[in-house]
Image: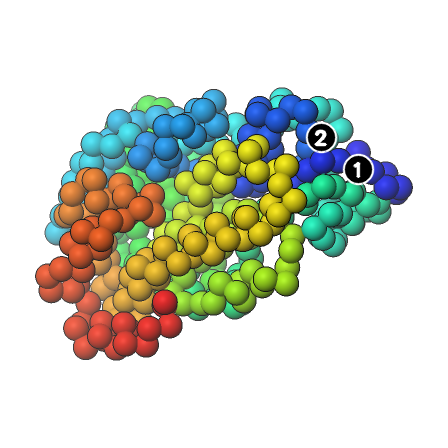
Amino acid sequence: MVGPSNDKCDIAIVGGGLAGGLAALALAAKRPDLDVRLIEPGPIGGNHIWSFFDSDIAKKDRWLVAPLVRYHWTAYDVRFPSHERKVRMGYKSITGEALADAVIAALPAGHIIADKAKHVAPDHVLLSRGGRLSAKHVIDARGGGKFPTLDCGWQKFVGQALTVKGGHGVEQPVVMDATAPQLDGYRFVYLLPFDAETLFVEDTYYSDDADLDAPVVRERIAAYAAAQGWDVAATTREESGVLPVVIAGDFDRLWPASDRTARIGVRAGAFHATTGYSLPDAVRTASSLPGLVDRADLPAILRNRAAASWRRQRFYRMLGAMAFRAADPGERYRIFERFYRLSPGLIARFYAGRSTTADKLRILSGRPPVPIGRAISALWKRDWR
């Protein structure tokens, strides 16, 4: 624990969520010669479940997440009013508890600092309870908040793990059940069967504002469970969140060149613009850090990588512009319904943020599932670039 006096280390990671936790694990595994500290006031990993498709992570990086996986399925389902489909693709889930256990085991005693950072600079951190931690590199992994410099829609959710007496009958994940009533934008229910009687049920919706009314969403989950005929005996966990769906913005305002503190994760703008999904980039970045941290220009390297990723996200920002500016909220599901009629390979590359030129043309081909005039207007604005 850092006291009121100066303490020193090689790498100080501020934020123990997904990006910060994975970075700590990668450095502990590949660079045991370094003194790595992790600053996180709450539980490492928080109360979260992160899921990913096998194709999201390159084979060379899977060593980092393989020990964290708690659930694995070989396929998943989607359901829409006019279309249902089973997609044969590996799907895995990591829990915040698994990440916390791994980080606690990997870092020496006293290297996890349960405090907030009140000031973060390239070479030091000032702690809320007093004390200064100096480092060769400080890496800011605190997440992004509500992104006031970006034009965003929002993906909002509440998820609960339900114990269903007698079993729930769900054999594999349902990534989107959009047969649920469409409320406050595009709404779907997400299901993860942990065992025969334990089912994680998440009510998710793409909305124009970032306000999450958790009690209302809990009522929706209860209504959905009742409609399925499930006898819910208990709720064993709950999580909630608000993820940005970026429509437009300027990377230089998100991460100004004048800010020379290294950033990773959502703090660096490193997430999928359409889904808010950050795990693939968090894994790639964490896996690369052991080979980069000896560089004096680490902050510039990470900023250049984040800027390049931002440029590659133009297509996904364009899709967000069409969804939020061209589609009526109650009709947004048609965009995803049409998308899920495309090939599994295209779908996999989309979620991984690696859509090819052919993929992009295929996604945009045919009659758009939004009014054509509004689609043209949304694209004409061009601020999504």
Nearer-the-camera pick, 141 or 195: 141
Tell me residue 335's x, y (percent). 22, 58
**How dense is the environment of label 2, judged by Cα within 10 Å: few (below 14), some, or many (20 and up)?**
some
Tell me residue 331's x, y (percent). 23, 64
Residue marked by disc 2: 35
Whether residue 246 appears in this view of the structure is yes
The three-letter amino acid code for the residue at tag 2 is Asp
The picture quadrant where one finds residue 33 is top right
The three-letter amino acid code for the residue at tag 1 is Lys
Q: Residue at x 63, y 63 (%)?
A: 258
In the displayed structure image, the side of residue 352 where residue 327 appears, left or right:
left
Q: Is residue 108 above or below residue 86?
A: above
Q: Which residue lies furthest to the left in this view?
A: 366
Q: Residue at x 36, y 68 (%)?
A: 384
Q: Is residue 339 above or below residue 148?
A: above
Q: Which colour scheme is used?
A: rainbow
Which of the numbered marks, if any, corresponds to residue 8? 1
The picture quadrant where one finds residue 7 is top right
